[in-house]
């Protein structure tokens, strides 16, 4: 669903009685480049998209929190006492919003009881981080309602803590940072080690470009399997190389890594090391020559994920190849991998041909028809208009 603010406020009243004290929104994100670099203390370059999650919220007496979502319109709200929350104590979707309140309290910021109704236009499981959009919408709502005055950087950490320790997904800090720090017409260059970030101009419209998201509709799950295995490989690789994190290795160190490590671990490392370099190059391109020149970096990132990190899949490869063959300037899978979405950077006039080529390739291969839409850099989380 994607209600107007007035409709969501009305739905809140139907659900909980009374009016919401306010509405807060937080966007999903797309990562331009820098994949699986975040938990290696490296660099990422996401932007906040215009698709967002909105939460209508009202403070209530006592310590009870009730949460409901327009995604489950017939379910009773999930109700908990804030004093009964503990790590991993909530199952299902409510672990995201309740995890944020738990993490805020764990970080020393007391929250009031409240009612929350969630609505979203961010597609779930498409690699656009509907999870961070949900966490960050709740985080800014709770921060304002409790007058805690928590900084955006700390709110990002709170969202990550909810996802890591209440949901149980070992994800990095990128998604929440993009959702909280994004700005219209800009990407967020984030150093995941220091937590420092800088806005980088990304005026796609002004350059006559579009960034297409191609949702393969192949579902992925961060909390299981490949994602955790890749994290482990990276940790083991860093340890074997005697550095705190893969961020500390340079391209020159790869020759030694190749001698020391088994082939698989070496290739995992090579992806992370070269990807960090590509992110820095992308920032240089965007501040200098402009977004039309980004293409080759995107395509090189895809090859690295496909061949070295091995997190692509047939559908993602088909989306990238078909886009490139129809004139995209660059394309790559985005997000955690094993499904989700690819992105393609293209001149606006080439977009119809690219859409047709991707749809045709999917149909010829017998894949489910993909969802294709374009995204633009929008503003970060805050009160909803
Ligand atoms: P994504 O790539 O979209 O972040 P995740 O698996 O990380 O995928 O997070 C998706 C999960 O977040 C959903 O399965 C659901 O539990 C929760 N979620 C996201 N948006 C909403 C929403 N509007 N209402 C309820 N739950 C939501
Ligand atoms: Mg997610």
Image: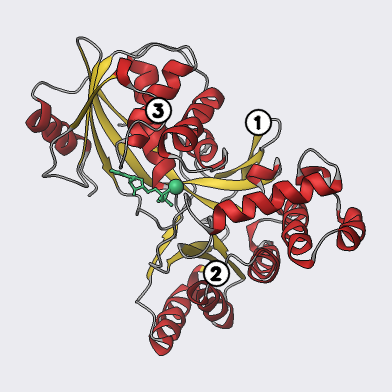
> Dot 1: what SS?
loop
Secondary structure at numbered mark 2:
strand
Query: What residue is rendered at 45% in x and 79% in y?
Result: 358
Q: On the picture, is 349 further left or further right than 23?
A: right
Question: Which one is earlier in the sequence, the residue at label 2 or at label 3?
Answer: 3
Q: Residue at x 48, y 75 (%)?
A: 315
Provide residue 257's location: percent of width, then percent of height: 87, 57
According to the picture, the residue beneath numbered tag 2 turns out to be 347
Q: Is residue 105 above or below residue 332?
A: above
The circle on residue 195 is 1
Image coordinates for residue 304, horizontal then vertical, percent:
69, 66
Mark 2: C-beta under 8 Å from nearest atom of ligand 1: no
Q: Which residue is mark 3?
A: 100
Task: Give the quadrant of the C terminus.
Answer: top left
> Which residue is rendered at x = 76% and y = 56% of the image?
269
Marker disc for residue 221: none
Mark before the other along the chain sequence, 1 or 2: 1
Q: Nearer the viewer, mark 2 or mark 3?
A: 3
Alpha-carbon distance for marks 2 and 3? 40 Å
The CA span between labels 1 and 3 is: 19 Å
Q: Position of residue 128 (x, y in %)?
A: 44, 52
* For residue 215, side relative to residue 276 (left or right): left
Can see residue 35?
no
| 59 displayed left or right of 185 | left
Q: Is residue 317 visible?
A: yes
């Amino acid at each position: 669903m994607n209600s107007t603010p007035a409709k969501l406020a009305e739905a809140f009243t139907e659900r909980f009685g009374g009016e919401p004290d306010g509405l807060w929104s937080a966007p999903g994100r797309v990562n331009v480049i820098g994949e699986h670099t975040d938990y290696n203390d490296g660099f990422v370059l996401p932007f906040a998209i215009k698709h967002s999650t909105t939460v209508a919220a009202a403070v209530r007496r006592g310590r009870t929190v009730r949460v409901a979502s327009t995604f489950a319109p017939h379910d009773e709200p999930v109700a908990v006492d804030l004093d009964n929350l503990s790590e991993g104590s909530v199952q299902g979707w409510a672990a995201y919003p309740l995890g944020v309140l738990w993490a805020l309290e764990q970080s020393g910021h007391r929250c009031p009881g409240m009612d929350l109704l969630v609505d979203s236009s961010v597609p779930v499981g498409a690699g656009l981080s509907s999870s961070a959009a949900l966490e960050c919408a709740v985080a800014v709502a709770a921060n304002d309602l409790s007058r805690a005055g928590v900084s955006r950087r700390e709110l990002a950490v709170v969202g990550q803590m909810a996802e890591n320790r209440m949901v149980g997904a070992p994800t990095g800090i990128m998604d929440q940072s993009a959702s909280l720090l994004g700005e219209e017409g800009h990407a967020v260059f984030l150093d995941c080690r220091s937590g420092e970030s800088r806005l980088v101009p990304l005026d796609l419209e002004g350059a006559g470009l579009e960034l297409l998201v191609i949702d393969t509709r192949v579902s992925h799950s961060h909390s299981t399997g490949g994602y955790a295995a890749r994290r482990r490989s990276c940790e083991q690789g860093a340890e074997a190389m005697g550095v705190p994190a893969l961020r500390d290795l340079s391209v020159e160190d790869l020759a030694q890594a190749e001698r020391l490590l088994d082939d698989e671990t070496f290739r995992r490392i090579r992806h992370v090391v070269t990807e960090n370099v590509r992110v820095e190059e992308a920032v240089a391109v965007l501040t200098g020559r402009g977004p039309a020149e980004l293409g080759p970096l995107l395509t090189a990132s895809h090859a690295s994920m496909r061949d070295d990190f091995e997190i692509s899949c047939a559908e993602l490869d088909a989306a990238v190849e078909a886009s490139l063959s129809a004139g995209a300037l660059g394309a790559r899978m985005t997000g955690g991998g094993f499904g989700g979405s690819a992105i393609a950077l293209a001149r606006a006039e080439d977009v119809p041909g690219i859409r047709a080529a991707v749809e045709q390739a999917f149909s010829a291969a017998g894949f489910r028809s993909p969802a294709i839409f374009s995204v633009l850099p929008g503003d970060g989380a805050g009160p909803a208009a």
